[in-house]
Image (cartoon, helix red, strand yellow):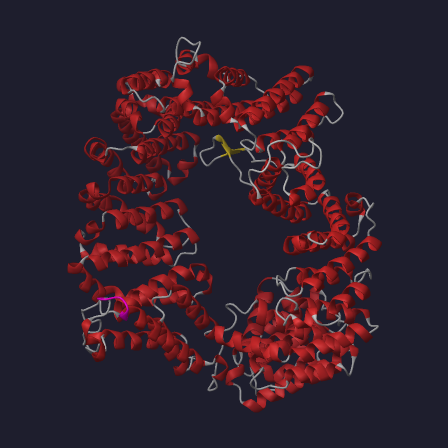
Amino acid sequence: MFPPCPPQSSMPAIMTMLADHAARQLLDFNQKLDINLLDNVVNCLYHGVGPQQRMAQEVLTHLKEHPDAWTRVDTILEFSQNMNTKYYALQILETVIKTRWKILPRNQCEGIKKYVVGLIIKTSSDAANVEVSELPLILFTILKQEWPKHWPTFISDIVGASRTSESLCQNNMIILKLLSEEVFDFSSGQMTQVKAKHLKDSMCNEFSQIFQLCQFVMENSQNAPLVHATLETLLRFLNWIPLGYIFETKLISTLVYKFLNVPMFRNVTLKCLTEIAGVSVSQYEEQFVSLFTLTMMQLKQMLPLNTNIRLAYANGKDDEQNFIQNLSLFLCTFLKEHGQLIEKRLNLRETLMEALHYMLLVSEVEETEIFKICLEYWNHLAAELYRESPFSTSTSPLLSGSQHFDVPPRRQLYLPVLSKVRLLMVSRMAKPEEVLVVENDQGEVVREFMKDTDSINLYKNMRETLVYLTHLDYADTERIMTEKLHNQVNGTEWSWKNLNTLCWAIGSISGAMHEEDEKRFLVTVIKDLLGLCEQKRGKDNKAIIASNIMYIVGQYPRFLRAHWKFLKTVVNKLFEFMHETHDGVQDMACDTFIKIAQKCRRHFVQVQVGEVMPFIDEILNNINTIICDLQPQQVHTFYEAVGYMIGAQTDQAVQEHLIEKYMLLPNQVWDSIIQQATKNVDILKDPETVKQLGSILKTNVRACKAVGHPFVIQLGRIYLDMLNVYKCLSENISAAIQTNGEMVTKQPLIRSMRTVKRETLKLISGWVSRSNDPQMVGENFVPPLLDAVLIDYQRNVPAAREPEVLSTMATIVNKLGGHITGEIPQIFDAVFECTLNMINKDFEEYPEHRTHFFYLLQAVNSHCFPAFLAIPPAQFKLVLDSIIWAFKHTMRNVADTGLQILYTLLQNVAQEEAAAQSFYQTYFCDILQHIFSVVTDTSHTAGLTMHASILAYMFNLVEEGKISATLNPSNPVSNQVFIQEYVANLLKSAFPHLQDAQVKVFVTGLFSLNQDIPAFKEHLRDFLVQIKEFAGEDTSDLFLEERETSLRQAQEEKHKLQMSVPGILNPHEIPEEMCD
């Protein structure tokens, strides 16, 4: 029993005792350990609060970190009655084994090992003991350090011990399972590559003993938990053991006959069979056939073919549900890998059909994860059958008599099954994408596309499967969809869910039918849906049907482009829906309108047969009436849609006339506000007016996005007024902040003013990124912009600086490239230092400024690099510091951008001969040091590929003599020798526990692998494994000599490759005999 925890009232007494430093006695290793005191401190950690708990935490942490703490573990385990204290003691032991094992004297290592083994033997029969679950893990940690070198007999020892007692055997199975996982599944990043290879070889060589033990248990033991543990362990072995053990022994039949139909073992057994089914080799065909037939025989007894698996799953316990999921995995794996083998055997056709019947039954289970597994197989099968003969048939094999001469034999075999799969796909089609209405930072309600990636991926996979199935037999797909639609109309299957899935399915096969068939099919579908809309009462019903009609028409642009009358009817119907205030209908109408506008844009600007003018003119003539019931954000979507049409007009004069007419409404409101502001500037402090300005600018932003460069005619019309409004609102914001402090930026009016500023910048950068005349942009648009924006940004308090200023500058630099190099110093003066001071205090504040700031740096670095060389050295150092700051960031996107900038910067510097050498002298070693600091920081592992690319590039520069300036003026040795020593010293001072041999091998690899990034990256990963533990004098299990040999070979290979390309090697590096 646990000793009762001290009641809360006695806690402070204990803690007073701790506060009086009695607890510190635990850290005095000259005194005998006071177990009661330790138990009390541990209790405080688990049950105390506040300062008491902190004190306990501190004492226990110090005790755990004490290099001799492990010497007290045996006393604690023997005398403590507190389970938490015992657990703590085992943690101490684990830590010392993981990190300091290599520096303990051998006799102590042997002592600990003996102690742990003894303890396992002693406690293995007591299942309630905390040591029972933890000790195998501890022994396993020792094993990782000791085997094979210091404990070569481990495998035979553990196998021998296992035969002496069943509880011990069960413990040992856990250790063997952990060992297999460690070596074969998780070795990457946990141990060096060479060590992993050695352990894999050792394990394979000694596997026969382990296999015999597993066999012995499976054949003879009556102890259920032991058998279960053995099957779990076997499962881990199956993905790597030599195949003979699987296919040339009785393993498969033992699994199927002895364990598959026993409820306690069926799940792990089925997992084992699935692992075997996934092996793809050709020499064991008979064994695979037997695996399939035996398993199917057992399955039919356990789960008769007439079982309603969907219901069984819904009512089943966890264990039964897992069995159905495992069954889906087994069938999917086997049929994908070996389905064709079974197909070829006529005597197995029936069994194959039974397996497919199970797959269909399991596919009906209402559980997404299981459905995904089944879907993977159906997708594979349909794709395979389609690719075998893509153009084999256009009439329906099912409807034209089964012996149709045109149908390839494999397809013929699967016809009846595939028809059921089609029905399944149509009935269960996933939702294409989610639309949500949310409030943004500015307090406005906007629509956000919430990408539920899981559901979208499911939709994509189902859509792809249904498209293949339609190609295999489109008439059958059409029959199923038409029948289901009739059942909606006649009411037998009517429900919102059924209608939605059906319409999503109809929308998903766009393009999979011949155009004529598509036309006939669609006309029926739309007619039926419009009829259904008339027939159903109630706004909700009508809204659902309407949104489905819109979804389907939006999916079939090919049909719309070919049928103008229908297209015009559809668009007019959408305009009707834009007045329907039911939730979601207007959104859907605007969404569908924009989809159609993008896909059919040209048709709206041409005069169609039977029309007197292009449809765009009708839209613009009635624009007022069409949009009068829409919300602002819907109006913006509408404007973007019409913009795509106008963008398709190729006659410039006509297009300009259209743009004027198109922007007439927003321009009237804009002009009226500007006129009022000219008379009385205070109008720009009126909340309603400022809100209107924001909305007008948003309309312009969306219109510009769609029209592109020609939008210049509208932008030019409002440009200078817009910049004046920007300046004026900036002054208002600054004044408000001066009077009321920074809190004022949260007020609605100030937020609206900032929206106007942001939309102004968005409009400008949106147009610049789409413009096709850099010179015009540079001469006419950039100077007034810089004038309005830069000084304002610099003068503002940090909280009022718009991050969009930085992104707009980045867009301009990206677009204008060299044309803007001359303005970079002015831009930098205004935004660089003041932004850097906002973001260099921590890694969290101003996240938007952070990302945009580094995008700007990246743009200048990529397109205007000479500007970097023109700024004063102090400012250049700031630039470099900020890049270093970026790649040390905890925000992943900022760190990635920082690394990208640095890599490009290094490549750019190398091109500038004049500046390169002084750059290397000043910064090269600094950069190396900082990159190593992130490489060895575990929170930056995600950037390892980029770290490897940068380091490889830098070491390559040194090795190829690209750096001619001396990197160490105080002691002029060759740069390669200096960098070797510099890096070695850097690493030794950071990780004093590393041995010289380890560092030497690591540094050698940095040079010899610098042309092979994947190998270089693995080399870094190996090093990261080594810095986690103290190696002591004995580094043999790091296999450094082997590593050195392989690095030397890599260096020689690289050299040979270089010699084969004339001119790659410096003439002085070419061996004499080759010079003749």
Q: Quadrant of residue 412?
A: top right
Q: Is residue 416 placed above or below 1007 in the rendered structure?
A: above
Does residue 958 belong to the magenta stretch?
no
Give the overall secondary structure of the magenta segment. Answer: loop
Does residue 1061 belong to the magenta stretch?
yes
- Residue drawn 56% across the image and 35% down it: 434
Residue 131: x %, y % from top left: 70, 75
Visible residue check, residue 1046: yes
Q: Quadrant of the N terminus?
A: bottom right
Visible residue check, residue 21: no
Q: Quadrant of residue 706?
A: top left
Say whether residue 403 is left or right of residue 146: right
Q: Is residue 811 placed above or below 293 in the rendered structure?
A: above
Pick out the residue farthest to the left. Answer: 914
Residue 257: x %, y % from top left: 81, 64
Residue stretch in magenta = 1059-1063
Looking at this view, is 759 or 332 the one in front?
Answer: 332
- Residue drawn 43% across the image and 33% down it: 747
Residue 281: x %, y % from top left: 62, 63
Pick out the residue farthest to the bottom. Answer: 107
- Residue drawn 19% across the image and 51% down it: 866
Looking at this view, is 1020 or 841 the one in front?
Answer: 1020
Q: Count every numbered label the image shows and give the total.
A: 0
Looking at this view, is 403 or 350 the one in front?
Answer: 403
Looking at this view, is 1022 or 763 the one in front?
Answer: 1022
Q: Is residue 18 placed above or below 503 in the rendered structure?
A: below
